[in-house]
Image (cartoon, rainbow, N blue to C red):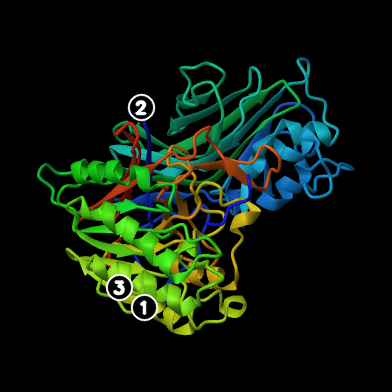
Amino acid sequence: MARPVLRTRHLLVVGAAALALLPAAAVPAAQAGEPGHGQAGHQTLWRGDFDGASGAWTVQTDGAPAGWRGWTFAARNDWFAAAAPAGVGCDPEKNQPLDPRCFLDGRNQFSRSRGVLAVADNGVAAAKGATVDGSHPVNSTLVSPGVPVGGKRAIELVFSSHYRQAHKAVGRVTVAFDGGAEKEILRYSAARISANGGGDVISGQEVIRVDAPQRARTAVFRFTYSNNRPQMYWAVDDVVARTPLPALSRGAKATTFQVLSDIQVEGLPYTDGALDLLRREAPGAKALLLAGDIISGPREQTQEQQVQEYADVSAAFARHRLPTVLPAIGNHDRRSRVLTPQQQQDNFLAFANRWGAGIDKPYYEKVVGGVPVIVLGEESGVAEQEKQSISDAQVAFLTRRLADWARQGKQVLVMKHYPFEWTVSGTYGNFYGNGPRDFELEAIVGKYPNVIFLSGHTHWSPYRRDWAARVVTQGGHPDGYTAVNTGALAMEFAPSPEDPWDEDSATDRPESPSVLTVAVYPDRTIVRAFDVLTGKQINEVEVARPAASR
């Protein structure tokens, strides 16, 4: 991507389906508080989303009511606007240095949030006139309705969480069965032994397993926030109660894939280590998925120089025993102003076919070990400004193929270099705003919970809590799709210290490389992220396979 000048891992389990997958046109919108009906490997008991039906919840706040004091239901952008400082210039192009208040205390880094949230925000409450101090603390509880759990031995509470630790602030989640005593199942606090390790939870997802008592009929969940300082907050979204996946059966067979992204020139020194690591972790992989930006592709690059960059990557690949390589085209693979889009597309295709892809255009489908892999990408001959170099034919192809695989109940891997906005790490930033075609493509993907969407481009680290996210689109399937950031071999990026809506390189060295493996089992898919420098696993996401359409 073009850049400005310059257990104890987190286990994330997604795919909390409630409805059997219906034909796309028949999928109903999510209903907050509506019981679900099941999915292969999961049964969703209740969805507690806040969009359109926040009345399913109740709020109990001590003391005199005041605007934004205690749990409040607010549209995400309204929350940001409420936190923006009045009368302070926050345009980084006009106002330097920016006032520290322009940074919203990280509120805008809730990448996985969409629509209406539940927010307990002492900073905004104090700014709007509420008195918050040691004599006037905020103690507020968000209470779910009774969730039906009859006949269930265990349940999981899953929710998106964005929390900044204020001094002595405490966030608690409890469960009570059939009106009995509350049991604490999660605590955020300044103590290192708390679930937040004493610090912040930035755009995280919590998955909490709770054993249900025999003959229990209902469960009530409470989110309690206590804070006596006029600062910081806790925001919650996408609450789901469901049954857990069973343990993976012994001897279960998987179709495995190796995944890497954004080699560019800077990542070449780490390619050998990355491929060795992938070979060790997924020795029987059926394909290597390469999520774009294979080369650096300077803007003044000539044909000879671009061909040489591809040759350099091929030379690194040739030192290893690789499965078939299935690449997506990235912006660096087609950013030369000297070469035509068609020349650059031809160079990309020549590289792809050298490594066994067998393709004639940047978008295609391959069935690998019984697993459908759909690759999307910018095309030559399509007007950049009008269609973002994505043709109508490619949109029709995606629409047709996803509908077909949904009818068969297949887990589908969809790979595209660019992420969609407000999904994985960093995509809250202005740099990642969707264009018209992106909105169109995501609306198609959002109809299908059997889609795992792999993207590169950001260079944000899989160490982050929102490296993978369950994304529910407006008008899409209520279970959403799973978005996964594939990391990068080239340099790592993170929030900018100068602009809250921008990013910058994150390390004192130019690279922080990472790779993924994907294992597709009959009832689930497990995606694991690895640090190339240490060779250790750094994160994991488990996605249940949805049922076939009826």
| Residue 105 visible here | yes
Q: CA distance from mark 2 to mark 1?
A: 43 Å
Q: Position of residue 145 (x, y in %)?
A: 52, 43
Q: Is residue 17 left or right of residue 120?
A: left
User: Mark 2 — residue?
Assistant: 8
Nearest-to-viewer mark from 2 and 1: 1
Q: Is residue 351 left or right of residue 369?
A: right
Dot 3 or dot 2, earlier in sequence:
2
Task: Identify the amino acid type marked 2.
Answer: Thr
Q: CA distance from mark 3 to mark 1?
A: 11 Å
Q: Quadrant of residue 7?
A: top left
Q: Position of residue 481 (x, y in %)?
A: 42, 59
How packed is label 3: few (under 14 Cα within 10 Å), some, or many (20 or more)? some
Cβ–Cβ below 8 Å for labels 3 and 2? no
How packed is label 2: few (under 14 Cα within 10 Å), some, or many (20 or more)? few
User: Mark 3 — residue?
Assistant: 365
| Helix, strand or loop for disc 3 | strand
User: Mark 1 — residue?
Assistant: 361
Q: Quadrant of residue 127?
A: top right
Task: Identify the amino acid type marked 3.
Answer: Glu
Cβ–Cβ below 8 Å for labels 2 and 1? no
Q: Is residue 389 above or below residue 260?
A: below
Q: Is residue 132 above or below residue 443?
A: above
